[in-house]
Image: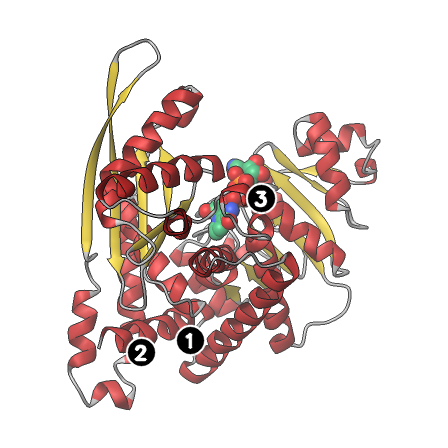
Amino acid sequence: MHTINPFESAMEQLEKAAEILMKEPHFAEASWGTQKIEILRQPQRQVNVSIPVKMDDGTQKIFEGYRIQFNNARGPYKGGIRYHPNVSLDEVKALSFWMTIKCSVADLPLGGSKGGIIVDPKTLSQTELERLSRGYARLITDIIGPDKDVPAPDVNTNGQIMGWMTDEYVRMTNDKWPMTNEEKKRLRATFTGKRIEDGGSEGREEATGLGGLFVLQGVLEQLKLKGKLTVAVQGFGNVGYNMAKFLFEQGFIVVAVSDSKGGIYVEEGINPELTLECKKKNGFLAGCYCSGSVCDLKKGKQISNDELLELPVDILIPSALENVLTAENAHKVKAKVILEMANGPTAPEADVIFFKKGIPVVPDVLSNSGGVTVSAFEWEQNLKGEHWTKEEVNQKLKTKMTKATKEVWDASVKHKVNLRTAAYVVALERILVAMK
Ligand code: NAD
C-alpha cells in the first residue's frame, strides 16, 4: 500500500490554495506572492537534537528529537511537542506547517512550529521522563522564548511536562542573564498548556471541544440546519468527551460515542457525563452497555467504530484518529455535516467524495483551533501578568471562533471550493501579506 508522506500532502494543500489565491487581481498583477509561496515550501529552521538521559539503572540512553520552526511572519512560532515512537522529521515538518495555517485561520498573532521526541513514554519512569523533558528543553533553550517560539503539549505530553520544561528554561536563561522574579514570571509565557498553578489558563482543558461547538454553531447557521439534531462522536478522550458534553448541554441528541475498544448507540441519546462515569467504572464504553446501571445504556446497542462512521445522523464528529474516513467508507457516510475534531481524519480521496456528495467537511485547521486559541490567551495572560476568569476566556474564544468560521465560509462561497481549501486560502493570504 502506498503510504502518504505527511509533508508531501501538506505541500499539496499549500499548492491548491496558492493556485486560487494567485488568480486574485492583487496577486496576479505582481510577482511577490509567488516568491513568498516558494519560501513556504520549506520550514525556516529545522533543529535535530540528541538528548542523553541517565536511566534509573545507571545506564545512559540517547533519544533523538526535533524542533521545526516553519514560519514566523505573523508572530512567534507556536506548536506542541509530541512524544511517540513514530515521530519522524517529515511528520514534524508537516505538523509545523499545519500549525502555521491553524494559527492564521484563527487570526492569532502567531506563526507555526512543532517538536517531537522519538520515544515511547510508557517505557520510562517518572524520573526518566522528567530528565528527558528537561534535557530537551535545555537543547532548544536558545531558539525558544515568549517572543521567539512557544511550545505546548501534544500527543503524550501534558501540563506536568510543560512545567518541567518551563522550570528548566527559566533556570538556563537566568544563568546567562540573572533576572528579577517579575521577569522570571513573564518568561513562563515561553510554554503554554501549563497547569493553573504554573501559570496556565482557565478553560484550556475543554477549549478544543468548546471551540468546536462554536464552529459547528456557525456552520449550522449557514446551512440553516435547526431542530433536534443527532450526533455521532468517534473518540471519547479530551476532545470527544468535551464535544459530546457541550452538544448535550445545547440540546443536541448524542446518539453514539466510541473509544478504542468500540462504541455504543442509543437512539434516545446519551448523557455524556453519566457515560464517562460509567466508562470509568467499566474501563471501556462498550462495557457500559452491558452494565447499564449508571447511564442507562442498556437501552442501546454496541457498535463498532466503522459502524459509527456510517450512522444516519445529522452530524458526524471524528475526534480520535487520522485517516478514518477513506475512499472505502466515504460513500457509506450518511451524515449531513462532518466536523473534524481529530487532526487529519479525512483522507484526500474521501474529501473529494464528500464534496461531490454535497456533505460539508469542516476542516481540522478550523474546527479544532480552539485549543491553540486558548493557548494564545495563556501566552498573552503570562506576558501581561494577568489571570482571566473562565467566563472571559470562553467569551473571547467564542468571538474568535465565530469570526474565523464566517471568514472561511465566505471564502468557500467566493472561490466555490470546499471548506478545507477555503480555510487554507484565508490563512495563506494573511501569511503572505505578513511576509511581505
Ligand atoms: P485523547 O488521548 O484524550 O483521546 C483519544 C480518544 O480516542 C480516546 O477515547 C481513545 O480511546 C480513542 N481512540 C483511540 N483509538 C481509537 C480507535 N481506533 N477508534 C476510535 N477511538 C479511538 O486525545 P485527544 O486530546 O482527545 O485528541 C483526539 C484528537 O484530537 C487527536 O487527533 C488530536 O491530535 C486532536 N486534537 C486535540 C487537541 C487537544 O486540545 N487535546 C487539540 C487539537 C487537536
SS at circle 3: helix
Residue under numbered circle 3: 238
In the drawing, does residue 312 fall left or right of residue 63?
A: right
Considering depth in this image, is 427 or 343 the residue closer to the camera?
427
Left or right: where 4 falls relative to 186: left
**Viewer-proximal residue among 57 and 279:** 57
Q: Amino acid at mark 3?
A: Asn
Q: CA distance from mark 1 to mark 3?
A: 31 Å
- The numbered mark at residue 77 is none
Percent x, y for residue 8? 25, 54
Which residue lies under the disc numbered 2? 20
Q: Residue furthest front?
A: 180
Q: Amino acid at mark 1?
A: Val
Verify CB contact (< 8 Å) between mark 1 and mark 2.
Answer: yes
Mark 1 or mark 3, whichever is nearer to me: 3
Residue located farthest toward the top when viewing the structure as drawn:
57
Q: Based on the displayed image, in which of its 4 quarters is residue 196 positioned?
A: top right
The quadrant holding residue 106 is: bottom left
Q: Which residue is mark 1?
A: 417
Cα distance in 3D space between marks 2 and 3: 36 Å
At numbered mark 2, what does the secondary structure look like: helix, strand or loop?
Answer: helix
